[in-house]
Amino acid sequence: MSGLTYRSVGVDVERKEDALRRVREKVARARRPEVIGDIGAFAGLFRFGGYRDPVLVATTDGVGTKIEVARRLGRYEVCGTDVVHQSVDDALAMGAEPLFFLDYFSTGRIDPAIFARIVGAIADACAAHRCALLGGETSEMPDVYGEGSFDLAGFLVGVVERDRILDPSAAREGDVLIGLPSTGLHTNGYTLARAAVARAAEAEGSAIEDELRRARPELRGSSLGDALLEPHRSYLEDVRRLRDAVAIRSIAHITGGAWEGNVPRALPDGLGAAIDRAAWTVPPVFRILARMGGVAEEEQWRTWNMGIGLVAVVPGDGERAALRALPDAISIGSVERASGPTRVRFV
Amino acid sequence: MSGLTYRSVGVDVERKEDALRRVREKVARARRPEVIGDIGAFAGLFRFGGYRDPVLVATTDGVGTKIEVARRLGRYEVCGTDVVHQSVDDALAMGAEPLFFLDYFSTGRIDPAIFARIVGAIADACAAHRCALLGGETSEMPDVYGEGSFDLAGFLVGVVERDRILDPSAAREGDVLIGLPSTGLHTNGYTLARAAVARAAEAEGSAIEDELRRARPELRGSSLGDALLEPHRSYLEDVRRLRDAVAIRSIAHITGGAWEGNVPRALPDGLGAAIDRAAWTVPPVFRILARMGGVAEEEQWRTWNMGIGLVAVVPGDGERAALRALPDAISIGSVERASGPTRVRFV
C-alpha cells in the first residue's frame, strides 16, 4: 500500500495554481493606484488617505442558491458578477463608494476553467466599479462539497465621509419612496424559486432543465433560466446621479427578507412605509414562479423583491427631481407612522 | 396540494433570527469605539483616523476541513477561534494590527445552538484581539451542504503605517530565521490528516471516532482529536514583543503550502531559506499522522507546518534579542542565496 500524498487525497496545489494563472490578467486590471504590491502576499495592501473624516463601510454576503441554477445551466459568470454587485449595493445603502473587494471560493475539487469564469467575472465587475480586487481565498474541501458544488462569498470595503453617511434616523413622515427596478430576483429567494420550478417539472412530468430552458411568451421568448440568471443590478451610477439631484435621507437594498426585512432598516423606530403595489408591474418571472409553486401573494412579498431592488427615501419636495434624474425610477410610496411589528403596509 | 412557503422549502428566517439572538451579547462585546451604529444595518461602519500614512491590510480565509474533525467530535468553538486567529496572523505577516472582522457562515440548515457556539467563539476571539466584529452573513443553502455540514470564512481588515509595512525585499543574506511554535496543524493539511486517520481506522478495523478519541501515550495521554482541534495560535502578542526588541525584516505565516509555499513569500527573489530541522522537535501529532498515512517525509513538510507556525526574518545581530524577547522562540535557520524553483533547503 503506497503512502498518502496531499494530492492523492484530493487536494492539488498545482491545480489551484493553474486556476489562479488563468485569471491573472483580469485580476491585474482590477486594481487602483492605492494598491501596494501583488496578490501573493499574506494580505492585500491598500494605501488610504485624502478624506476629511472617513468611515470605512464593510459588508459580506454570498450568492445563495442562485449558484445551483447557474451550475445546472453551466452559466457561472453571473455568480461572480453578483457577489460584487450585491456588496456594492449594500455599501451604497450606507452612502459609501467601494474601495476594495476580496472573494472566498470554496469547492470540493477546483475545476480551473469554472474557477476562471467565476473569478474572472469578479475581477471584471470590480474593474467596472473602480474597486480593487485585493485578495481572495480558494479552498478545496472534498468532503464538504459534493461533485461540482461550490460556495462563493464576497467581502467589500468602501468609504464614506462621516457627515455623508446615510442614516435611517434622517427619514421623516411624508418622505417619498423612490424605487429602482430590479433585474429579477437578484440573489434572494432562490431556494423557493427552485422548489417552485421542481414542483412544476414534477407536475408536468418534465425535467427541471426543460422548465428552465423553454422559451416562454410571458418572458417575450426568453427562458425562465435566463430570467433567473439575470445579474444582480448594481445601483452605483443611479445612486450617484440621485445624490447629485436630491438630498437622499436613506436607502434600503431589497435583499434577503425582501420588503419587511429591508425597508424598515432605512427608517427610524416609529416610522414605516406605505407601498403602492399598483405603482409598478411585477415582472413576469415572479408571477411564473408563484404560479408554479402555488406561492401565496404575501409569501411572495416576504421572500422576493417583486421587481424593485433598491428604495431611496427622499424628502417629498425632492420627488420630481429624483424621478427626473433616474429615468427608470418609480415613486412607490411614502413614509408614515407605524407601530406594531409590521412596518411595511401594502396599499 | 398546498402552496410553497420559504419555510416549507427549508429556509426559515425566524430560525436565523433565533441564532443571531443567541450571540447578541458576545457580539456586543466585540466592539471598538470606532464602530458606529449596530449590526442590522446594510453594512458595518468603522470610523477611521489618527494615522500618518495608513495602509489598510485585508485578508480572507476559511478553516478548511478542520471543520469536519470539529463536527465529528462536536467541538465547534475551535472553528470560530481559528477563523479569527489565522486572519490576525496573515495581517501580522504584513506588519498590521487588526481593526475589524466579518464572518461568512454557510450551512444546509442553521442549528441555532451550533451557530451560537461558532459565532460566539468568533466574537470572543475578536474581543480578545481588540478587533471589532463589524458584520457577518449567515446563509442557509439546503442543496449545497449536506446534513450538519457547513463552511466558515473570515475577512479581516487591519492597518499599518506605510513605513512600517513588513516588506520581503528588506531581507538580506545572512539574516536569521526565528521560528515560533505552532499548536499543531493550525488550519492546514486536514484533508491529508483525516485521510491518514481513516486509513489507520480501516487497517485496525476500528471506527474513526475511536482513533480520534483514544488517549495516546505519545500525546501524554491526550487524544489525536484533542491535538487536531488545538486552536490556531495567534501570534499578535509575540510579534508586538518581537517588534519592540528587534527590527523585523519580514514575516512568513506558515499556512497552506507549508514551508516552500510560505517562507519564500517573506523573501525577495534570489534569496531562500536554510532550515535546520534539528533545531526543534517535530510535535508527536505530525509523527502519528505520518505513520498512520504512510506519508513520506518530504510530503509532510510540503503540507504541514511541522511545529512552527510563524517565521520572522531578523538581522543576524538581532538574534539574541529576539530569542530573549520570546521565551519559546527558536532560531531555526538563516537566509541564503537561492536560484531555481525550490527556495527552502532543509539541512
Image: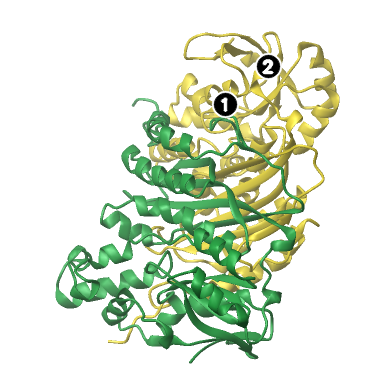
Chain colours: A yellow, B green
Q: Is the C terminus of chain A in the top left, top right, bottom left or bottom right quadrant?
A: top right
Q: Residue pushed farthest left?
A: B205
Amino acid type at image mark 1: Asn
The kind of residue on which mark 2 rests is: Ala
x and y, in percent, of residue A285 in the image: 58, 32
Question: Do dots 2 and 1 share one subunit?
Answer: yes
Q: Please, what secondary structure does the residue beneath circle 2 have? A: loop
Relative image position of residue B72 (x, y in whole percent): 27, 57
Kindly report the distance in space between the C-alpha atoms of the residues bearing marks 2 and 1. Answer: 15 Å
Q: Is residue A144 visible?
A: yes
> Considering only vertical position in the picture, is B190 above or below A274?
below
- Residue pictured at 49% horizontal, 62% vertical: B235
Q: In what element is the residue under mark 1? A: helix
Q: Which residue is mark 1?
A: A262
- Circle 1 packing at 10 Å, graded few (<14), some (14-19), many (20+), is many
The label shown at residue B14 is: none
For the point 53% across and 57% down, the residue is B88
From this viewpoint, is residue A14 visible?
A: no
The quadrant where residue B313 appears: bottom right
Q: What residue is disc 2 on? A: A171
Chain ID, mark 1: A
Within 10 Å of disc 2 (Cα), the crowding (few <14, some 14-19, many 20+) is: many
Q: Position of residue A72 (x, y in %)?
A: 50, 52
